[in-house]
Image (cartoon, helix red, strand yellow):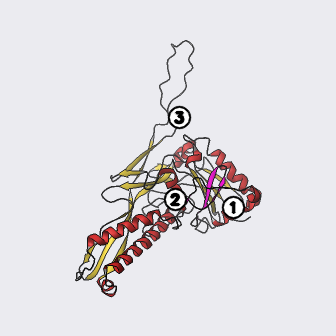
Amino acid sequence: MPVTSLSVDNELLSTTAIMAAEEAKDALHINTPLIEAQERVHSKGFPNKSGGVKWIQGIGTGDHSKNTRMRTGYEAIDLSVTGVATPVVTTPAKVVRPVLISGEEEELNGGEEQIIDIVAMRTKQTIGGLKRDFCKQIVQGGVTGFEDWGTLNGVDYTSGTGPGGGLLEILAHGSQVNTYGGFNKTSFQSVPGAQNVRYDVGGSFNSAGLTGLNRVLIETEKYADDDLLKSRVVLASTAGMENLKRSLQAYERYTNADTLDGTNLKLHVGGVPVAVEHYMPTSGTNTATDPLSFYIIDFSNIYVCWSKGIQDGYFGMSEFREVGGDYDVRRALITVRGQLWVRKWSTSAVVFDGETF
């Protein structure tokens, strides 16, 4: 049956929930380093794309053209083209989570102020949970409801999650094989842009961890098109961060500028901010043997692209309405819609097997 007594109409309830949703999007206490890191580079809700059933991104698989030696000015210029862009084709994925209030709850909490408080609280709780699940999917994979989304975890997910296998592999440069959005890395193993950087710590962070982390930070600069100091972030497992701090000790440097959460001091390595990502894959099917201790993400080339349509794909909030049928319930939906996006692999990296000091 429908809601029989609306002490707060749908319009007011929706306005309240939307305001609460905006507050929750900005809430720094919600531990989502991945989103905070991307917003540090691109700002809130960006990059985004409008509509479309399929999204297409061309991946350069060569230097496009060749050099011509010029001495007299009459030499024939070599116009042959190499590395024509190969498309990555993905489908925007959508996940919703409802905010609900029943007629019974409205009666028991009679009064406009109490009902508004309940809805505001539930909206913030719902967005907090959705943000955490979203980040877990991107960082680790395997989250219920997010099966159509991509993931960075290319160790546990070599195929079959959303657009394909995880983006960052631990296989050696030139041996990586995952397919993403129809782009088969096996076919482009000699193409630097199609291979991520990786480093195997070998089980002892004290022996090789800091060396490996610095090495990949340097190596990812080789094929950079932009200033990586502005676009890179290191996401660390809990043990990875503990080992890093233990290695640095008196040499560690903190700064207030461009921190991930705007308030807490963050550790920097090689000028790149480091944040703990609690969902780093360390106990999956394959990462139990080869735990991923650090992702080095270049957010100018690997990032979440949000869908911008009728409803905002960046944790957009719908209006409240009656569920109908036999339910004396009103609901609104919070939506995430978009996809994990890649332009180039070579400026991002993974450091693995560094959980033990």
Give me the disc on residue 222: none
Residue type beneath disc 3: Asp
106 in relation to 175, above or below: below
Nearest to the observer: residue 223 or residue 87: 223
- The image position of residue 79, as x and y in percent, is 47, 25
Residue at 67 percent across and 66 percent down: it is 239
Residue 30 x %, y %: 51, 67
Give, as a three-letter code, the residue at label 1. Gly
The disc at residue 354 is 1
First along the sequence among labels 3 and 2 = 2
**Part of the protein shown in magenta:** 259-282
Q: Main secondary structure of the magenta part?
A: loop
Quadrant containing the N terminus is bottom left
Depth check, mark 3 against mark 1: the one in front is: 1
Q: Secondary structure at mark 3?
A: loop
Residue to which mark 3 is pinned: 63
- Of helix, strand and loop, which one carries label 1? loop
Q: Which residue is mark 2?
A: 36
